[in-house]
Amino acid sequence: MARESIGTPPESVISIIGPGMKVIGDCITDGTVRVEGTVEGSIKAGKAVVIGKQGSVIGDVQTQDAVISGRVSGTLVAESRLELQATCQIDGDVKTRRMQLEEGALLNGTVHMSEARRSTGSGVGTNTRAPAHAEAGREREPATTATPGR
């Protein structure tokens, strides 16, 4: 009879790509990935991605929570929360529900923010701001269509 091993749940495992280490290929885990070296490929982590000051990812990143101090060149999706620290540089699109952007962080790309559902109620302790895309049920025309002097 085979014995099941009792181990650490996959979502609690932290995988570390250390300084000076270079990974070429995709990284997939249910837990957390910490990058202090370089990844050339995508990262998909079920829990979190942390990129240190010297860390670099050339590829897409998808996770629940992300803290970025280094560099990302690609699409960055943090389904729950994204923290961009002062030393980071992002070159690509960002998708998240909540974002903290420190002064000094560089972000070159588009930002898409949304929530799964909006709170409704008395307004006490709730977010009463209307979403940016909700303007009488239609999208706004881009600002580039206006021509000065006409």
Image (tube, helix red, strand yellow):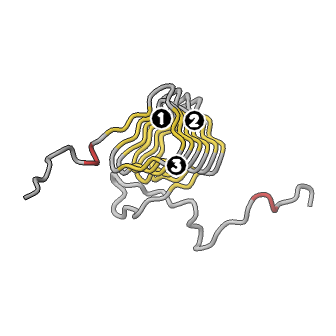
Residue at image location 48% in from the left, 56% down from the top: 129
List the single residue furthest toward the right: 149
Q: Are marks 1 and 3 in contact (CB under 8 Å)?
A: no
Determine whether the residue tagged by mark 3 lies in a helix, strand or loop.
loop
> Mark 2 — residue?
71
Give the vertical position of 35 relative to 118 (above or below): above
Q: Amino acid at mark 1?
A: Ile
> What amino acid type should be assigned to the residue bearing mark 3?
Ser
- Asked if residue 141 lies left or right of residue 11, the reply is right
Residue at x 56%, y 66% (from the top left corner): 134
| Distance between the alpha carbons at the discs numbered 2 and 1 | 8 Å
Left or right of 79, for residue 137: right
Q: How far from the left and from the top, in percent, is residue 126?
A: 36, 55
Q: Earlier in the sequence, mark 2 or mark 1?
A: 1
Q: CA distance from mark 1 to mark 3?
A: 13 Å
- In the image, taking residue 67 as reference, residue 75 lies left or right, namely right
**Frontmost residue, 25 versus 8:** 25
Which residue is under mark 3?
42
Residue 83 x/y as whole percent:
46, 39
Give, as a three-letter code, the residue at label 2. Arg
Q: Is residue 48 above or below residue 117?
A: above
Q: Nearer the viewer, residue 23 or 94?
A: 23
Nearest-to-viewer mark from 1 and 3: 3
The residue at which mark 1 appears reads as: 51
Residue contact between numbered discs 2 and 1, judged by CB atoms under 8 Å: yes
Of residues 91 and 25, the one drawn nearer to the viewer in this rendering = 25
The image quarter in which residue 137 lies? bottom right
Give the crowd class for mark 3: few <14, some 14-19, many >=20 residues within 10 Å.
many
